[in-house]
Amino acid sequence: METILFLSSSESDGRLSRAGLEAAAASALAKALGVKSRAGLFGASAAPAVAQLAGAGFEKAFIIESAALAQGRYATDAAAAQALAKVSAASLVLAPSNARIQRVAAGLAQRLGGVVDTHATELLNDGGVVALRRWYYRQRLLAKQSRTARPWVITVDAGTAPAHVASGSLDSEAVAFSAPASRSQVTGLRSPSSGPQTIRPDAALLLVAGAGWCKKQADGALRVPDAERLILGFLDKTQASLGGSKSVVDQTGDGASLSFMSHVNQVGQTGSTPRHAKGLSTCCHGEEPHVVGWRFVGERRAVNLNAGCGWAQGKADVLYVADAFQVMEALNKLL
């Protein structure tokens, strides 16, 4: 019989990230299978995370709290994850696809003598057999797969399940942990200088800007300052997240470019695949390499002057044939 362990690191405040709470909700698979499920948490502090998991269906939470786990590093994180997996006697380990877990997932499977699959988008009870769904080849092929080998480590992508909301209480048990020797030491954090906040993974709306914003407009003039004002004004009023096509992010630093746009904002085959409830594309033609990144966006709308653009070929739910400058100006006034 399966024993499921939900494994996650805690954040600096001892709580779980939204991705962690989403993966915890995915662990409801245990209830469907009628098997035991436990939680395993590690970090400098984990008590707040235990409280967040109350009501998720776990029998108990095993926790490892250590100053050595305050910052993520492979040696200490892998050792903590291994200790939690062993004390819980887990045959199936489910974890969020965050940076700390992804770094150690394969190593954890090797230490346990098991197997690993990453970036699952759905966990299934397939006639009493655990299965998962995930995308391959730049989100073009959706596969369903299962394994007989155990232990099986699975990481679950963010945005694929609703976040768990705590209710009631959950008992916890501290697990003895001795941090392995480490030659690295974190002496502080240094962040690069940054402009306006444009990436908001939890936002309900994704606004994508295309290269058309930086081209000559109908009057023959470049209107990049106006474009920046309109886009940033919209983001500020709606708290939307900003994405960009490959064309517009490649223009960064080339003169006629959006100062706040970078490759981190890129959406598409060679960029990210965000999971927002709604998306609005502006000044973008809707070519396939970009549109593939919209696969997980719920409601897709686009603004383009060309009625025959890629968005019109069934790639958007609604296409507004209009000037994006005029549309965004009107939207910002309404907001």
Image (cartoon, rainbow, N blue to C red):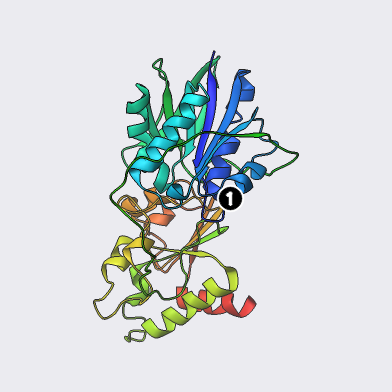
Residue found 37% across the figure and 31% down from its top: 108
Q: Quadrant of the N terminus?
A: top right
Whole-percent x, y for residue 171 in the image: 68, 34
Residue at far right of view: 168
Does residue 256 sit above or below 235 in this rendering? Answer: below
Does residue 332 sit above or below 80 in this rendering? Answer: below
Left or right for 104, reference 86: left
Residue found 29% across the figure and 64% down from its top: 247
Whole-percent x, y for residue 111 in the image: 34, 27
Q: Secondary structure at mark 1?
A: loop
Residue found 31% across the figure and 46% down from its top: 182
Residue found 46% across the figure and 63% down from its top: 199
Left or right for 211, reference 25: left
Q: Amino acid at mark 1?
A: Arg
Res. 323 in view: no
Res. 57 in view: yes
Q: Which residue is mark 1?
A: 15
Q: Quadrant of the C terminus?
A: bottom right
Whole-percent x, y for residue 334 in the image: 64, 77
Q: How many marks?
A: 1
Whole-percent x, y for residue 128 in the image: 55, 14
Mark 1 Cα shell of 10 Å, populated few (<14), some (14-19), many (≥20): many
Location of residue 62 by image quarter: top right
Left or right for 59, reference 276: right
Location of residue 54 by image quarter: top right
- Toward the viewer: 50 or 236? 50
Does residue 286 sit above or below 35 in this rendering? Answer: below
- Toward the viewer: 133 or 213? 133
- Toward the viewer: 91 or 237? 91
